């Protein structure tokens, strides 16, 4: 079957959208517009985004925001307070370490201790209608841990509104498949688990799944070495340092992409989480753990 694709850069990554009908290509343009719209709301790297405006006025006043920003910050605070690894107020640490950029570095212990005092999701102030603020000066929101998942889900809503029954939304490795796969007789999608020891696109394992979201948290792409010490980008807001972990990566399959983001972070921080506990989350479908000793574990 013929695939129709578009590729472009957004959200700091490569976006690939795939449909299987020439008519469905018409959704590509509004999809890009929608991604651009959300990036202008959520990005901490755009000075006029709503999140940047909230950060600039931390400790001073609340900002009137759009409904998507209000909804995502509300969810981000709720998840942050569960202590599952994701912390929406980790922004000061993320910017200081700057992992993934040319000037990434290990901050001094004094600087880390100072920044830890600026990280507290309890101090995110949310008031209806659509007012968001930060209680303490120099606090910073960073929704990078869940924003791509939220955007993928909104794209899926758009595609459904357009009547698209089959397709793939790929936001830099955050994968969302729609409908039954037209590529295989069993109608299941083939989703590759990235091999952390090989270039992107080389699969360590291929799993068969119905329509789902696949989100990976891993230490093998954004990292640096300084004074013979390896540092990755998944920061622990309890210590101020990259999380100490036996994992290379964990891929989580869910019915919604934003919950894939949440659960992949949770399982990266707590890989021993019991399957019974995971099944309490109605969004969870399966997970694949890849360990630094090359062991693979599958939960479903």
Image (cartoon, helix red, strand yellow):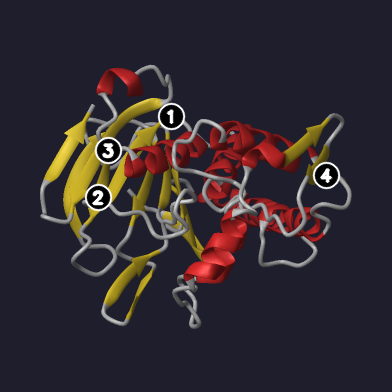
Tell which of 59 and 126 is nearer to you.
59
Check contact, mark 3 vs mark 4: CB within 8 A: no
Q: Which residue is mark 3?
A: 271
Which of marks 3 and 2 precedes in the sequence? 2
User: Is label 3 in a helix, a strand or a loop?
Assistant: loop
Rendered residue at 68%/53% (across/down): 42
Residue 27 visible in the shown view? yes
Which of marks 1 and 3 precedes in the sequence? 1
Check contact, mark 2 vs mark 1: CB within 8 A: no
Residue 162 visible in the shown view? no
Disc 2/disc 3 C-alpha distance (Å): 20 Å
Which of marks 4 and 3 precedes in the sequence? 4
Q: Which residue is mark 2?
A: 192
Disc 2/disc 1 C-alpha distance (Å): 17 Å
Vertical side of 229 occupied by 288: above or below = above
Disc 4/disc 1 C-alpha distance (Å): 28 Å
Q: In which quadrant will I find the C terminus?
A: top left
Vertical side of 59 occupied by 124: above or below = above
Rendered residue at 10%/48% (across/down): 295
Q: Residue furthest front?
A: 110
Which of marks 1 and 4 precedes in the sequence? 4
Picture coordinates of residue 97 (x, y %)?
Answer: 50, 70
Rendered residue at 18%/50% (across/down): 291
Q: Does residue 65 appear left or right of residue 118 in this picture?
A: right
Disc assigned to residue 65: 4
What crowding class fits label 2: few (fewer than 14 Cα within 10 Å), some (14-19), or many (20 or more)?
some
Vertical side of 103 occupied by 27: above or below = above
User: Is label 1 in a helix, a strand or a loop?
Assistant: loop
- Disc 4 versus disc 1: nearer the observer: 4
- Disc 2 versus disc 3: nearer the observer: 3
Q: Which residue is mark 1?
A: 255
Q: Does residue 199 appear left or right of residue 242 in this picture?
A: left
């Amino acid at each position: 079957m013929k695939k129709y694709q578009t590729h472009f850069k957004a959200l700091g990554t490569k976006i690939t959208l795939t449909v299987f009908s020439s008519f469905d290509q018409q959704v590509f343009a509004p999809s890009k517009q929608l991604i651009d719209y959300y990036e202008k709301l959520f990005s901490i790297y755009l000075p006029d985004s709503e999140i940047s405006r909230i950060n600039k006025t931390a400790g001073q006043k609340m900002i009137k925001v759009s409904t998507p920003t209000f909804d995502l910050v509300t969810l981000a605070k709720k998840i942050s307070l569960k202590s599952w690894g994701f912390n929406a107020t980790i922004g000061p640490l993320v910017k200081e370490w700057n992992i993934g950029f040319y000037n990434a570095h290990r901050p001094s212990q004094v600087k880390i201790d100072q920044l830890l005092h600026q990280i507290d999701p309890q101090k995110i102030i949310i008031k209806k209608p659509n007012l968001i603020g930060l209680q303490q000066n120099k606090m910073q929101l960073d929704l990078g841990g869940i924003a791509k998942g939220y955007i993928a889900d909104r794209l899926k809503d758009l595609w459904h509104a357009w009547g698209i029954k089959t397709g793939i939304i790929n936001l830099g490795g955050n994968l969302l498949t729609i409908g039954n796969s037209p590529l295989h007789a069993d109608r299941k999608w083939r989703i590759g688990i990235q091999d952390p020891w090989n270039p992107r696109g080389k699969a360590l394992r291929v799993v068969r799944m119905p329509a789902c979201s696949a989100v990976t948290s891993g230490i093998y792409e954004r990292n640096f070495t300084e004074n013979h010490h390896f540092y990755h980008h998944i920061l622990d807001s309890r210590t101020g340092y990259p999380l100490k972990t036996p994992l290379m990566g964990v891929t989580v399959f869910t019915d919604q992409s934003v919950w894939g983001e949440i659960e992949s972070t949770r399982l990266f921080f707590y890989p021993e989480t019991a399957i019974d506990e995971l099944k309490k989350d109605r969004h969870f479908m399966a997970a694949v753990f890849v360990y630094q000793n090359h062991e693979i574990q599958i939960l479903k």
